[in-house]
Image (tube, grey):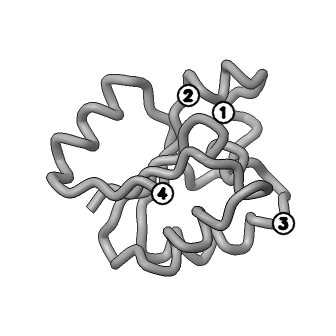
């Protein structure tokens, strides 16, 4: 299953809920304001590290750039993808849960 999180973890519990319900092997895509969960050294970093033990976490690079960030600002194990990568994730995961 692909989980998509587009809300800032500073303004919504969507990320926490997503991580709590994601099953091993799931993919999680952080996009729009959800990209803030991918940043290095935040109060959410610990939850992201724990989630990475069962899920692959992606961040949409155009949304990073739109907010003035680049891949150097995100946690190491998070993979950056472009729009083609987003389409590939949707194709590879027939079930998508938006948070």
Q: Mark 2 and mark 3 in contact (Cβ < 8 Å)?
A: no
In the displayed structure, 89 sits above or below 5; it is: above
| Label whose residue precedes the other's in the sequence (1 or 3) | 3
Q: Which residue is label 4 attached to?
A: 99
Residue 8 vs residue 62, the one in the foreground: 8
| Residue 8 at x, y percent in the picture | 70, 49
Numbered circle sitting on residue 43: 3
What residue is shown at x 51% (from left), y 80% (from top)?
20
Q: Is residue 47 left or right of residue 59?
A: right
Q: Mark 4 and mark 1 in contact (Cβ < 8 Å)?
A: no
Q: Secondary structure at mark 1?
A: helix
Disc 3 from disc 2: Cα separation = 21 Å
Disc 3 from disc 4: Cα separation = 20 Å
Q: Which residue is label 2 attached to?
A: 61
| Label whose residue precedes the other's in the sequence (1 or 4) | 1
Disc 1 from disc 2: Cα separation = 7 Å
Q: Mark 2 and mark 1 in contact (Cβ < 8 Å)?
A: yes
- The crowd level at tag 3 (other Cα within 10 Å; few <14, some 14-19, many 20+) is few
Residue 32 vs residue 78, the one in the foreground: 32
Q: Which residue is label 1 attached to?
A: 71
Q: Mark 4 and mark 3 in contact (Cβ < 8 Å)?
A: no
What residue is shown at x 64% (from left), y 51% (from top)?
76
């Amino acid at each position: 299953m692909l989980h998509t999180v587009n809300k800032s973890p500073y303004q919504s519990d969507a990320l926490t809920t997503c991580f709590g319900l994601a099953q091993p092997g799931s993919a999680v895509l952080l996009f729009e304001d959800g990209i803030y969960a991918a940043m290095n050294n935040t109060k959410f970093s610990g939850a992201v590290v724990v989630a990475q033990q069962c899920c692959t976490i992606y961040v949409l690079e155009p949304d990073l750039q739109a907010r003035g960030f680049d891949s150097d600002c995100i946690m190491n194990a998070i993979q950056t993808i472009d729009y083609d990568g987003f389409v590939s994730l949707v194709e590879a995961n027939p079930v998508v849960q938006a948070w």
